[in-house]
Amino acid sequence: MPRDAYSDRARLALFVTEAGWRTVRTHAMAQPARPWRMATIPVPGRLVLAPQDLRTGDATRAGDIYSGRFAFAGKVVNTGGLSPFEVEPPSREWAEELMGFGWLRHLRAAETAIARANARALVSDWMTLRAHRQPGARTPEVCARRIISWLSQAQLILQEADQAFFRRVVQSLTAQVRHLRSLEFSIRDGYPRLLAAMALCFAGLCMADQSRLLRIAQRRVVEELERQILPDGGHVSRNPGLLVEILLDLLPLRQAFHARNLPPPAPLMNAIDRMMPMLRFFRHGDGAFALFNGMGPTPGDSLATVLAYDDARGVPVANAPHSGYQRIEAGGTVVIADTGTPPPMAMSHEAHAGCLSFELSSGRSRIVLNCGVPAVSRDAWRPMARRTAAHSTVTVEEVSSCRFIADGMMMRLCGTPVVEGPGEVKVERFEHDGAHIVRASHDGYVRRFGILHQRSWRLSRDGRRLDGEDVLRPVGGATFEGDQPDRFAVRFHLHHAVAPSRLADGHTVLLAMPGGENWIFAAPNLRIDIEESLMLAASGGARRCDQLVISGRVRHLPRLVWTFMRADGGGMPREKR
């Protein structure tokens, strides 16, 4: 067995052991808190601060909530006069959104006495029915989100409330903070751990007489930011969308320090300064984020809110080597490519097998993209969305370049991390005759098939032409004879608004886009097939789209060249599909 295979097994064994211990510890700590733990976080006599909630509220949804209609995660429940905490949740995602209380912002947006009374009644229901014992409420991520939501909407909940209700809320809030504090070292690594640290820091700032909690939580936030926010501003999980989610809490946390006349920790300020340029790095001309590693539909309102805090508003960086991405831009054309290895196993639960995939846009029109993940029913779509075939790159034998824990007892214990994938991705970036060139290679198919994939992108100075090259090179003495597997497919998933038409020569495709702009895709002497695909990250749910596919065998076609060109005129004969 290859030496690196033993290394992978050792890493997986360690990860499984840690996951099992975390599960046991979380279950044990879900019991009532020990008295000594309760004593470390005293019940405050007052709340001294309500941090700003940057997430957009929709006043129209307040009426639905008042009438007992709760729409979360693509599911709608009419409670029929019952409390929402008494009904059977239609999905895990629905229950987590309900128990996270982020929807309180919609009631606040209504700015009516009825909405405030409704908010108090629902919070009272949660406390009276002991909803914290329900599975959807106990996870650290949901508990952290609920703490932040209650603190952010404290004015909504407590305005016009009597003293008895105020004491109940503060006591419940303190119990939740104690519970989250007790779970701190058993929380899943990555964003959940950072979210929990931020929630505890908010509690230390907003609740009176919590200097000890604030010191501990502030230290935890600093530690997690230094571990998780990379030097180029990306998140260690490589999910672009997490940058928005983190900043939506990190910016109000910075404001909360100022409001308490306390200097925000320098690492917090530095993390914000690094993350802001990366928001622009991942944006296409229409404002949407590139669909890599768990990114779903771009939350336009949240992104606009966060970008309003970006004082620099500079040109996006082009090279993000720590995050594993490259951006090429010229003449209104943007190319964003995944040139990184998978994240550390503990933080790879959302990572995709999309190494050397790319997205292409012209102005406000996206042309080539990856399938992404939907906003709802992510669990159901995740196995398909993570496959290499769901990305605009090369697959060998329809096998993904990464291997995941995807089912069975291991998934229930450990989640869905990447357990094997590209170990080395080499990247070069340079200019030649005014054109921007990026060349990269990955070894994700070497162990199984003895094939190294190398891809190059060359964007012309005026942005009107993108030339690409895929090289599939045998390594380690691999030979492709007889039945040895070496079939490959090169896929280019198209935005659902792009209408492809294959021309009569069979190796050229006209790409018609809204607004009248046309592009041409050409692969000399190669047959291009137009097949169905799905854009999972479309706003409003998955949308049917098309993909361009070039297939072959490495033994016959180890090198492919292809080109996207902006077209100035029509009149070209088309082949019927």
Image (spheres, helix red, strand yellow):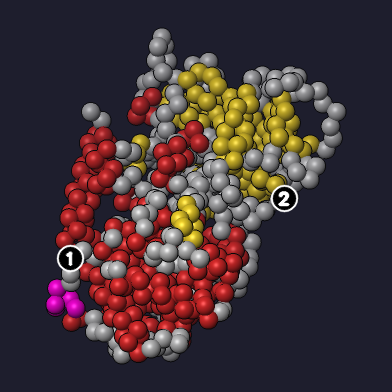
Q: Residue at x 18, y 72 (%)?
A: 33
Residue 312 image offset from top left, x and y in percent:
61, 71
Q: Which residues are magenta?
A: 34-38
Residue in front for this viewpoint, 421 or 511: 511
Residue in front for this viewpoint, 81 or 71: 81
Whether residue 236 sits left or right of residue 360 in the image: it is left
Whether residue 284 sits left or right of residue 12 in the image: it is right
Q: Residue at x 31, y 51 (%)?
A: 346
Q: Which mark is residue 31?
A: 1
Visible residue check, residue 5:
yes
Amino acid at circle 2: Gly
Amino acid at circle 1: Gln
- Looking at the image, which residue sits at the far front? 81
Predominant SS along the magenta part = helix
Q: Residue at x 54, y 69 (%)?
A: 62
Visible residue check, residue 561:
no
Q: Which mark is residue 363?
A: 2
Residue 407 image offset from top left, x and y in percent:
31, 38
SS under mark 1: loop
